[in-house]
């Protein structure tokens, strides 16, 4: 099965955001990946809900919203108001993760949980049956354009084994340093969805790059 491709608009040209979103609309990408950063949980700030409302208005693809923030549960109503398909929260930011997952599902969105590169897959064993998707960060979150962490491949395999062992239906998404070379290895290891930023938006033919990633 072909991987789901989710272009990350963190790498888009913000001076031509409408153009870049329209490119995604035309492309074979399944989702639009949106990173929300607060400068506290991660050492960077991205964009707030006024910009996201604009993105949601223009996008014809489902929104995959990734909150790299403290207390993400406070923003469930705002993410729901965007019409988001998936709301992704960090394991490390949610001391009451099971409750947050329930709240996201009750709001009508697909709940997903993200883990950082240094967080082991085993921490998900008690929640894996309750989530739609797990996002593995293959770089340290906060900035685009970072080098892919090789150990991420082993984590994909470990997560795949945990999903199969528990009977979970969770998808595996990977974000960070994804390009044609790393993407091929991630898909081989068991990844279902690939988030790509620079690989797409820095390419002179971004639609073609999305098509090539989709064909991995």
Image (spheres, rainbow, N blue to C red):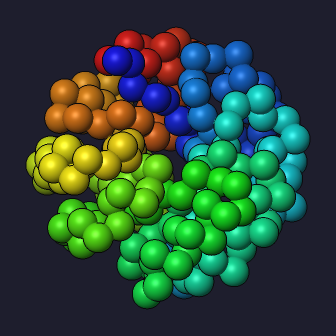
- Name the residue rendered at 53%, 35% in the picture: 6
Most foreground residue, 126 or 87: 126
Image coordinates for residue 35, horizontal then vertical, percent: 59, 57
72 w.r.t. 143: above or below: below
169 w.r.t. 210: above or below: below
- Name the residue rendered at 32%, 24% in the picture: 180
Residue 182 in view = no
149 w.r.t. 188: above or below: below
* Rendered image quadrant of residue 185: top left
- Name the residue rendered at 26%, 47% in the picture: 167
Indicate left or right for 124 with 132 as reference. left
Indicate left or right for 31 with 169 as reference. right
Image coordinates for residue 153, horizontal then vertical, percent: 17, 45
Most foreground residue, 17 or 63: 63
Q: Quadrant of the N terminus?
A: top left
Q: Quadrant of the C terminus?
A: top left
Residue 28 in view = yes
Indicate left or right for 207 with 172 as reference. right
Image coordinates for residue 163, horizontal then vertical, percent: 24, 49
């Amino acid at each position: 099965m072909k991987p789901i491709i989710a272009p990350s608009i963190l790498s888009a040209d913000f001076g031509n955001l409408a153009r870049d979103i329209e490119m995604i609309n035309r492309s074979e990408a399944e989702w639009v990946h949106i990173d929300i950063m607060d400068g506290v949980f991660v050492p960077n700030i991205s964009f707030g809900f006024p910009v996201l409302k604009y993105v949601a208005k223009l996008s014809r693809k489902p929104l995959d919203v990734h909150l790299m923030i403290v207390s993400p549960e406070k923003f469930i109503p705002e993410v729901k108001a965007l019409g988001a398909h998936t709301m992704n929260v960090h394991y490390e930011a949610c001391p009451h993760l099971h409750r947050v997952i329930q709240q996201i599902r009750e709001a009508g969105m697909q709940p997903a949980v993200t883990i950082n590169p240094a967080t082991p897959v085993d921490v998900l064993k008690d929640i894996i049956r309750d989530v739609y998707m797990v996002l593995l960060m293959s770089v340290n979150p906060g900035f685009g354009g970072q080098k892919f962490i090789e150990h991420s491949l082993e984590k994909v395999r470990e997560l795949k084994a945990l999903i199969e062992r528990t009977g979970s239906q969770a998808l595996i998404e990977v974000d960070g340093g994804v390009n044609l070379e790393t993407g091929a290895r991630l898909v081989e290891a068991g990844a279902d969805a690939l988030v790509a930023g620079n690989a797409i938006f820095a390419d002179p033919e971004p639609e073609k790059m999305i098509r090539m990633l989709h064909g991995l």
